[in-house]
Image: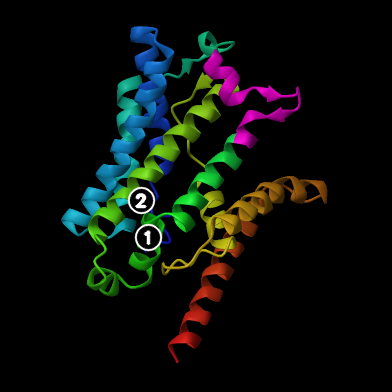
Amino acid sequence: MVVIAGEIDLSFGSIMAVGTLVFVNVFQTTGNLALAFVSCLVAGFLVGLLNGIIVVRLGIPSLVATIGTQFFWRGVVLVVTGGHPASLVPVKGTILYQALVSRVAGYVPAQMLWAVIVAALVWAFLNRHKFGAHVYLTGDNENSARLMGVNVDRTRMMVFAIVGLAAAFAGLLASLEVNYFWVNLGEGYLMRTLASVFLGGTSVFGGTGTILGTFVGCFIIGAIEAGTVAIGLSGFWTQLIYGLIIVLSVSMHAAVNRRLAR
């Protein structure tokens, strides 16, 4: 959504760690699992909203702003934890654990079902709600969107907040799966995520993109690493392939945009 709106967020990996850190601290302090879960999501939402405020109110390009906040929030996690991880074993066996990372019918990871649910929700927002129309209009032509009465600033801030909310949720899922919170949580996701988005047809120039394309892109990117190993190549080839996908996808969008401009 943030890329469709003509922006980019490179800090979501650090937000994953921040949200999970809040979950761990609240749970250890209060013992209340529901409060810890809500606090995790709220923390992610607020950190994402702060990104939006920096970009919109201060006029800093989102690429630069989120690079800065990426380092900042990662630093916050390291300072607060002293670099020490935390066990999530006490959460294992709880209702929350079963709902988020259990195995449905003994085989299907609950994370897979949550991926489908999140994709459906985002699809509904983008295609059946005026907010989605505002996101597309903002990314396509900001000046035209303003003339049509769209609150462009609020729309841009909200997409950053939604990314923060989703990142915190994803970070919690990843940590509960291994029953541990590692301070480097979220590192290594950036390349794969961007490759999934661009491969799925979302234009880096904004205004174009579908949740179905991104959903399919995620599956393709997820299969690349296993596929390269299966055909006998080393895992190092995955980085090369991810980079090619990003460059080729952006190049194709640039070529199409130039042709349409003519």
Question: Could you say where residue 124 lies in the image, as x and y percent from the top left?
Answer: 49, 50
Q: Residue at x 39, y 7 (%)?
A: 31
Is residue 262 positioned above or below 90 on the image?
A: below
Check disc 1: other Cα within 10 Å, few if <14, some if 14-19, many if 20+. many
Q: Residue at x 50, y 45 (%)?
A: 121
Front position in the image: 91 or 94: 94
- Placement of the N terminus among the 4 image quadrants: bottom left
Secondary element at image label 2: helix
- What residue sits right under mark 1 in the picture? 135
Front position in the image: 178 or 243: 178
Marks 2 and 1 sit apart, C-alpha to C-alpha, by 8 Å
Residue 109: within the magenta? yes
In the picture, the disc for residue 169 is none
Q: Residue at x 60, y 64 (%)?
A: 244
Find the magenta span and give its range: 95-113
Q: Amino acid at mark 1?
A: Val
Mark 1 and mark 2 in contact (Cβ < 8 Å)?
A: yes
Q: Residue at x 38, y 26 (%)?
A: 40
In the picture, the disc for residue 159 is 2
Front position in the image: 225 or 35: 35
Q: Amino acid at mark 2?
A: Val
Secondary element at image label 1: helix
